[in-house]
Amino acid sequence: MMIRISDITKSYKGVKAVDGLSLAVGDGELFSLLGVNGAGKTTTIKTMCCLCPFDSGSVEIGGFDVVKQPEKVKELIGVSPQETAVARNLSVYENLVLMGGVHGFSKEKSKNIAEEMISKFNLSKFRDMQAKKLSGGWQRRLSIAMALVSDPKVLFLDEPTLGLDVIARSELWDVIRELKGKVTIILTTHYLEEAESLSDRVGIMRDGKLLFCGKCDELVSGTGAKSFEDAFVKTVKEGKGE
Amino acid sequence: MKMTAFSSRVAKEIIRDPLSLIFGLCFPVVLLLLLSAINANVPVNVFDIEKLTPGIAVFGYSFLTLFSAQLVSGDRCSAMLIRLFTAPMSAADFILGYMLPLFPMAVVQSIVCFGTAMLLGLEPSVNIVFAVLLLLPSALFFIGLGVLCGTFLSEKAVGGLCGALLTNLTAFASGAWFDLSLVGSAFRKICELLPFAHSVYIGRNALSGNFADIFPDMYYVLGYMLAAMIFAVIAFMRKMKEA
């Protein structure tokens, strides 16, 4: 297993954001974490990215403990945060080179990877354009490319298509599909059709608890619902864990 | 390597922001020109260039707080910092990466300020070089304060607190262009609890060659500088632990 979360709990001022969550994600799997706002998805992702100390339990990425070996974990992960986290005054190329640099790559290696990413993500026509001048869709594309510069084993995509139009979203789905199987992906999204279309498995959270973990069709058949969306709504409303 | 890459990015962000150049370099120069023009047109010597120049140089540094706070706060609010926190960078990589590019900017600011002053009649002397060097701890104080503010404040709050409040505080509490005693001894005492006036005194004493007189002002400035740096480092490290 690439990711192993064992019974983690995290509270903020007495309120449990994550409550006894356990989860395992396999190598190359695309796992979507679903839930309404405040369900605990972002906190769960932050614990996996060494960004949020938790109260109890353990999290391992690639066999490394996120608390005891954060440096090792950080070498394995790439993150594309919910907001388009790009250096606004830097060009597309410079943003990509920057990510190589902060991962400790030589200038030459960073430049080569930047060119490779530009080609892979069809960013050539925007190569020297400042990131702030890109459209939302292209900024998201750049954001994912930046997360991949370090050749991570695990990629975290936090609502990657939020606010994008249908075409931009579809294009980004193609990008994510290209990555499937090559890298373990943890995706959070509010778009259920996105989760259904892209995921190998999904996890549904509410009040910090994991209510369901499995394949989309298992969720639909298990709840007796007509569609994935109905099954999701039913699961969250009933709020019963597995 | 990681720190160099990060500081190079910070430098590019500063240089490509026209406001940095306008406020950091042009505004102090305009102020110097304006006050010198006033001085030339009134019968009494209100704004002596030897006294005015170090004050304007220190005032210019207050914009370094704004720049550094804007950078850190902007990275925090845009989640760029979250992305960077997941890279294998140390706290030292981050803090030095933010601060180092602002240091040469402080030197350039001082050179431009003293260079303009020479065109306006400041007598060229080696003391100008010493004044620039001895003002650098003040620049570090302003940069550290910016990182500290940027770690806590939103971009909007940074604009208000570091942009409006701090620049005005520096202007009025430093005695850059008026004698603090003119407002009253109580005002002067309050101002001298802060580092701004002491920074100006250091610059003036260095410029006039009274190097023995830079103390105890230098102690105040070094104390504030260390406090700003230490608090900035602690605050940033705490932010790194729980982003």
Image (cartoon, rainbow, N blue to C red):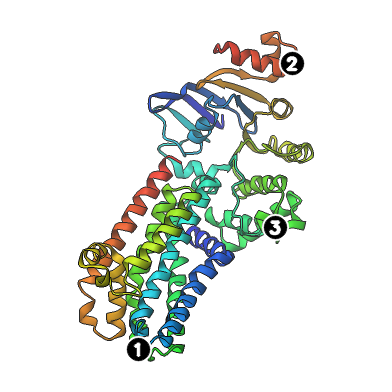
Q: Residues within 10 Å of mark 1 (few under 14, many from 20)?
A: few
Q: Which residue is mark 1?
A: B126
Image quadrant where residue B139 sits: bottom left
Residue B112 in view, yes or no: no
Q: Residues within 10 Å of mark 3 (few under 14, many from 20)?
A: some
* Label 2 – label 3 distance at C-alpha: 42 Å
The label on residue A115 is: 3
Q: Earlier in the sequence, mark 2 or mark 3?
A: 3
Residue B123 in view, yes or no: yes
Chain ID at mark 3: A
The answer to whether B227 appears left or right of B123 in the picture is left
The answer to whether B227 appears left or right of A20 in the picture is left
**Residue B8: x %, y % from top left:** 53, 64
**Residue B91: x %, y % from top left:** 41, 52
Q: Residues within 10 Å of mark 2 (few under 14, many from 20)?
A: some
Q: Nearer the viewer, residue A29 or B208?
A: B208
Please tell me which residue is depicted at 50% across the width and 56% down the height of the picture.
B71
Q: Which residue is mark 2?
A: A227
The label on residue B146 is: none
Q: Secondary structure at mark 2?
A: loop
Residue type, label 3: Glu
Name, please, the residue furthest toward the right. A167
Chain ID at mark 1: B
Residue type, label 2: Ser
Q: Secondary structure at mark 1?
A: helix
- Between marks 1 and 3 in the image, the one whose residue lies nearer the viewer: 1
**Residue A40: x %, y % from top left:** 52, 27
Please tell me which residue is depicted at 47% across the width and 66% down the height of the picture.
B101
